[in-house]
Amino acid sequence: MTLKPQLARLGLFDAKVPRYTSYPTAPHFSNDVGADLFGDWISGIAPGSSISLYIHVPFCRRLCWFCACRTQGTQTDNPVIAYVDVLKAELDLLAARLPEGVTLSRLHWGGGTPTLLNADLMRELAGRILQIVPLGPDAEFSVEIDPNEIDETRLDALAEAGMNRASIGVQDFDDEIQKTIGRIQSYDVTRKAAEMIRARGISSLNADILYGLPHQTKARMTESVQKLLSLNPDRVALYGYAHVPWMAKRQQLIPSDALPTPEQRLELFETARRLFLWDNYAEIGIDHFATQDDGLTHALHAGRLKRNFQGYTDDQAPFLIGLGASSISRFPQGYAQNAPATSAHTKAIREGRFSTSRGHLFKGQDVLRSRLIEALMCDFQINSNEILRDYDISAAELQQMYAKANSAFDGLLRVDENGLFIPPDARALTRMIARSFDAYDLSKAGHSSAI
């Protein structure tokens, strides 16, 4: 099943499918969820529970052309200082709703560029967070770090606050590719950032690298991956670049005729994948790799691997609360998203209310299908005993779902009384197979290439 003609026949090179970091995916959110309901969900958390907290910082010194995230550029600290004040006010709203004894399983600062904050702002923000929700046992505090926007002073502040995992974006080390995507970041700058991080006892290091970039070749991919491996990251996310200039206007600066074809994208992915496997990294889901002693690898082997808006995770907390503009929260009841625009988010918080502008209430088979899709994305299989034990579905209906998915892929999948299994040679099709269990309108925007 590794032959390109077979993959092409099944639609791998033409399909546009979700990344399935949630189900239903964000384009299906509506205004059914507002600030009051979001507040009620927080109040309904049982005392003493463990939660995860995501803090979104949407500012960058420069806007990379390849990025499709909601970010805004700033050359001064004034907007950042004002935004941190808003985050602290939002944290106060959270504190007023949170039951007693709640602790953090995971704390993640993302963006944008969280390391745009100066050291004093970092200390203020971390102090306010941990005053309201302290870190629990074995908690993880991670921060996305731009190697171009970090120094000793800021790293000292983060280490003092308890950061124990850092994530650095690499994208690609090739000079021509960096110029084409508007992201100049040398290997030396990246290596120095990694060394400064580890010098502070922060041993856990994540890195992101992209395939499918303009001018990328197998030789260039090989060189970039080998340079990345020399930094000994504990986890690597190997993401496919999504070229969506109609959604992210800055991507119009990237020449589309320099992009690899879908077939070439697959070759680039396989090139990088082989290098990680040769270096004894464990393959985690469809696009992550981790060292053998990393938490993701342990979660994979134990059947506890999860998927959320940051990708794959070993976090078992049932509540993910997002703070800051555009952040998304997940509760057992559904999803809630803050106002995407910083101005709208700020206005709501200053008026003393959450900025929740949309979301999704789980209904029907949402929770069931969410688990089916997550199982495929994490484990490449669905365990029938687990599904029948935990969800309201008959064995006959579950088998019908399997049969429908299998028929769409010419009987390629293995289906028996134990469940459904994606063979190794077909795993490039995983997102397409997961789509077979998606009950929503697949014409919605927000999908990207299947490879």
Image (cartoon, rainbow, N blue to C red):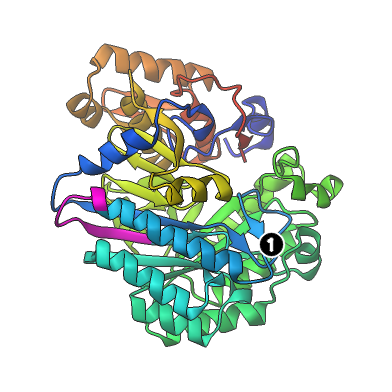
The relative height of residue 86 versus residue 344 in the rendered view (above or below) is below
Query: Where residue 376 sits: x, y (%)?
Result: 40, 36
Q: Furthest-front residue in view?
A: 351
**Any magenta on residue 97?**
yes
**Any magenta on residue 166?**
no
The relative height of residue 225 versus residue 54 in the rendered view (above or below) is below
Mark 1 highlights which residue?
221
- How many discs appear? 1
Query: Where residue 199 sits: x, y (%)?
Result: 44, 87
Q: Residue at x 46, y 27 (%)?
A: 31
Any part of residue 314 in sight: no
Quadrant of the image for the N terminus? top right
Q: Residue at x 22, y 42 (%)?
A: 43
The relative height of residue 415 versus residue 378 in the rendered view (above or below) is above
Amino acid of disc 1 = Met
Q: Quadrant of residue 189?
A: bottom right
Disc 1, SS: helix
Q: Residue at x 56, y 66 (%)?
A: 80
Q: Residue at x 81, y 66 (%)?
A: 176
Q: Is residue 15 left or right of residue 310?
A: right
The relative height of residue 143 versus residue 17 in the rendered view (above or below) is below
Q: Is residue 450 left or right of residue 387?
A: right
Quadrant of the image for the C terminus? top right
Query: Where residue 103 sits: x, y (%)?
Result: 21, 59
Closer to the camera, 79 or 291? 79
User: Magenta part of the protein: which range?
Assistant: 96-107
Any part of residue 267 in sight: yes
Q: Is residue 313 left or right of residue 216?
A: left
Label 1 crowd (10 A; few <14 / some 14-19 / many >=20): many
Query: Where residue 424 sits: x, y (%)?
Result: 47, 41
